[in-house]
Image: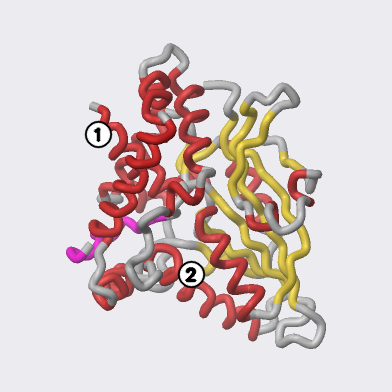
Amino acid sequence: MKRHTTGYLFFVLLGEFLFVNVACAQPPAAVAPEVAKTDKKSQTPEKTERSYLRVDETEEGKSRALQTAIVQYVGKPGSPFAGQEVDLVGVVHIGQAEYYQELKKRLATYDTVLYELVAPDGTRIRPEDLEKRRSILASMQSGMKDMLNLEYQLEKIDYMATNFRHADMSPEEFAKDFNRRGDSIWKMGARMMGAGMATNAANGGEAGLLLALFSDDRARRMKQVMARQMVDIDTVTAGMSDENGEDTLIQGRNAKAFGILRDELEQGKKRVAVFYGAGHLLDMAKRLEKNFEMTYVKTEWLDGWDLTRN
């Protein structure tokens, strides 16, 4: 039971933090919330600028909400994209209904929203397409939303909005990038699972998950346990990179997305959002600073999960 639960949690974390939204097409064989204003936590230099998922606590130190970041960057004076704004809009793929309502309202204000979806170039998701989703990960995500009394991102965000543009790998590109490196999603998954199990054994996290699973208020307790593990980026991403320090899930997909971002900015778009899983944002921020000559402006936080109720 213990090994089964650890493996299940690993795949849940992979989906919710590591950002894999997969379109309804068959995958390749090879493979109203409280909107937190910028506060003292988000003004902490460097450390918080590099934090894109956090557990917000009450004054008594109790878990209140799992929060995702919206991080604003602006092109430096004299740079190719001087004065143009790029916001990294982090997201978890299951969350409160009010969370997605707030995201929809904000995303409607951008010139372009670049969104993630491992699917053929230009794919749009219609509500009727969701019934055709066949991937294992999609089934797990749907099951977890019911267990935690949350909603599913693809069902709550309008991907047919006129300002939305697909900015992710196709299934063929996804598989090709793994094959190029002699890697696979299963090898990567095994590396990550091994690292996660070792960490759980060291910190006793498995016991907390099991207690939550069988508690009377299971949804609330499980959200609290999972939120704490999701924000531990070192644990969740351990083992993701291959022996050369490369990976497809973050670096490969981010490279594809930022090629499209460059195209949008070169067209003169003034405000662009990159709407991706929170785990992508650290690498994306580095790309904005190094390759796009952009500078950090501010971070805002949205409540994705209410950790005080079922």
- Residue drawn at x 63%, y 64% is 273
- Amino acid identity at mark 2: Asn
In this rendered view, identify the residue nearer to me: 226 or 83: 226
Q: Residue furthest left?
A: 29
Identify the residue under disc 1.
3
> Is 119 in the magenta?
no
The image shows residue 296, relative to residue 200, as above or below, that is below
Residue 209 image position (x, y, % from top left):
40, 26
Residue 146 image position (x, y, % from top left):
40, 30
Identify the residue under disc 2.
254
| Side of 200 where 300 appears, left or right | right
| Res 122 visible | yes
| Magenta part of the chain | 20-30
- Residue drawn at x 31%, y 74% is 177
| Res 104 visible | no
Residue 85 image position (x, y, % from top left):
73, 70
Badge 1 or badge 2: first in the primary sequence: 1
Residue 147 image position (x, y, % from top left):
39, 28
